[in-house]
Amino acid sequence: MTSFSDRFLVPPGKKLCLANHDPSSTKGFDGDKGAGRARLDVQNARLEELQETLYAQGKHRLLVVLQAMDAGGKDGTIRSVFDGVNPQGVKVACFKQPTSTELAHDFLWRIHPHAPAAGEIAIWNRSHYEDVLITRVHDLCNEARWRARYEQIAAFEAMLASEGTTIRKIFLHISKDEQKQRLQERIDNPQKRWKWSSRDLDERARWDDYQAAYEEALGATSTELAPWFVVPADRNWFRDLVVAEILVAALEGLDLRMPLGDPAIEGLQVP
């Protein structure tokens, strides 16, 4: 039976065309924001319950990879979807421009230390995929080198999965018009100007190049063990709902059980 979140899955081995994915879609809720938010509340509560069990059991791991165009909503997604979870069991890694030390190593060197430990959820705000996106669009290395990274990434993720990590990779898909509005708001709203970078306009000018890079990278690296999902992200409430559904489904697929604790304390009374 196909779940709600499965409709956003990038099928392994299939080419991806982002033009076939409507970034303003609210499919399944017909634009009913109230019903969507109510469902999100239910899924947030369920995610909190599952994450608490994951942390207490200390057996399974969940890796969440978030990628998007600039202003795609990665920060907002993390705030909304993970609101209320136990922060002891969730960690966020944000991968910015590599340092000189990081550039002196292989491209996965700075990534691996941020993989989740047993009982943890790790959220990657940008990721190792920058090395087949930015490097390609800005011609930072030759094509043979960045193309080889598709296979290297797949092997890396397969290794993580074989060691017990459940992986869900999410591309927050916004339209060019929506990006324009969000970038303009960063200029117009004093509370958001800290997010503005002069590079934003330079990157926006490369929109088509990035779309092509994303299409190929997601299509080449969506696997059974580490699938990609293209999530419509023009509507924040629907974006958050879909991401929550994806993660709840992933955790419900694990053998999560709250530890029974020490049976010797049965009936013990604290003086």
Image (cartoon, grey):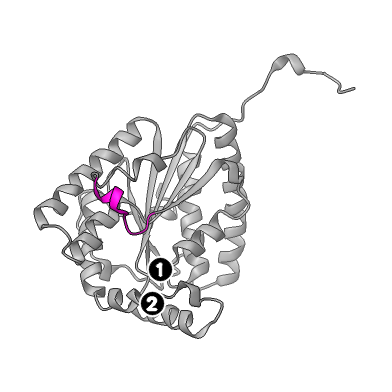
Q: Which label's residue is closer to the chain start, 1 or 2?
A: 1
In-front residue for pair 172/199: 199
Query: What residue sits 32% from the left and 48% below the top?
Result: 227
Judging by the rendered image, the residue that carries numbered circle 1 is: 72
Residue 54, image quadrant = top right
Q: Amino acid at mark 2?
A: Gln
From the image, which quarter does the C terminus lie in? top right
x then y, percent, for residue 11: 27, 51
Is 163 a magenta residue? no
Q: Is residue 138 left or right of residue 117?
A: left
**Location of residue 83 with respect to 198 vertically, above or below:** above
- Kindly check if marks 1 and 2 are in contact, taking CB atoms under 8 A apart as contact: yes
Q: Is residue 86 left or right of residue 21?
A: right
Query: What residue sits 46% from the left and 72% below the top?
Result: 195
Classed neighbour count for the residue bearing mark 1: other residues with Cα under 10 Å, few (<14), some (14–19), many (≥20): many
Task: List the single residue furthest toward the front.
Answer: 100
Query: What residue sits 37% from the left and 71% below the top?
Result: 174
Q: Amino acid at mark 1?
A: Gly
In-front residue for pair 136/105: 105
Q: Which residues are magenta?
A: 95-104
Q: Which mark is residue 208?
A: none
Residue 265, image quadrant = top right
Disc 1 from disc 2: Cα separation:
7 Å
